[in-house]
Image (spheres, rainbow, N blue to C red):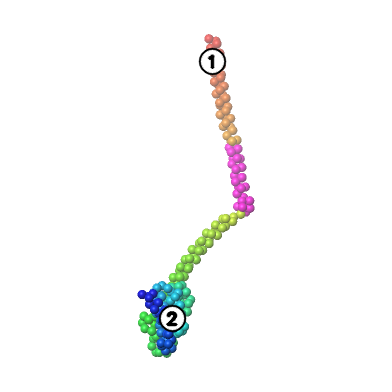
Amino acid sequence: MYKCASEIFQSILNSPTIDQQYKPEETKRLLVDVCNNMALCQMKLNDFPKAKQSCKDALQHDPKNIKALCRIAKCCIVLGQYDEAESSLEEAKSFHKLSTASNGTESGTIGDSGSIDSINHISNLLRHSKAHYKVKEKAMYKKMGKGIVVRKQTQDNDTSPPLGNQPAALGNPSTAIHDSVQNSSATSKITGFQNYPRILFIFSSLLVFIAAVLLQYFLRGKLQKLH
């Protein structure tokens, strides 16, 4: 439905005889209404870039059109263009005050895109959208910061000095390994020296035992010869 209506509005804008059918002031109002209504259809179709452009086309015919300014602000909020949305709202508020002061009544009706209620509603929407964006941006930067720290730590580990160029305070790992091996060999040697008395005792005991056995066989042979 909205697509069909948008195409009808576009055909009206493309009509070559529209200037001939109406008076200049009526033509201007008609073109502004057609552009604004086409923008509304495009917003319903979620085509916010085209809707924004349609509103700008309306402003070419009526630069003070509050409805077009409000819809530009809505489109900019959806597109994340908060500065432009704020600028459009400020213009809408300014023109609304001028219109109210000159006419003595509020321009637009309740619920209309050009009413003060609509302007305030869009202002609140802009404020909440900016706050939500800041929260998301802060979370994103925090996540990026963690990634940078991890990446920097990884780079620091990858670019650590070679083994031969280690700081003196930390000591050279290859030297430390070599010293550890030498200490281990020295410890084993010391342990070997400490075990020598035990080995000598076992060896001497074994010799005494062998000597006792041989002596026993020798004495037994002698006794047998005597008998």
Q: Is residue 182 left or right of residue 123?
A: right
Local crowd at mark 1 within 10 Å, few (<14), some, or many (≥20)? few
> At which x and y percent is residue 114?
40, 82
Q: Residue at x 44, y 83 (%)?
A: 16
The three-letter amino acid code for the residue at tag 2 is: Asn
Q: Is residue 155 magenta?
A: no
Q: Which mark is residue 220?
A: 1
> At which x and y percent is residue 62?
45, 85
Q: Residue at x 56, y 32 (%)?
A: 198
Residue 78: image quadrant is: bottom left
Whole-angstrom CA distance, mark 1 to mark 2, is 141 Å
Q: Is residue 27 left or right of residue 159?
A: left
* Helix, strand or loop at mark 2: loop
Residue hosting label 2: 14
Quadrant in which the N terminus is drawn: bottom left
Q: Residue at x 59, y 33 (%)?
A: 196
Task: Tell which circle, 1 or 2, labels the residue nearer the N-terminal end.
Answer: 2
* Helix, strand or loop at mark 1: helix
Q: Is residue 213 left or right of residue 165?
A: left
Q: Residue at x 63, y 53 (%)?
A: 165
Would you place residue 177 above or below residue 157 in this image? above
Residue 26 visible? The answer is no
Magenta residues?
162-191
Residue closer to the observer: 47 or 159? 47
Residue closer to the observer: 44 or 152? 44
Q: Is residue 186 magenta?
A: yes
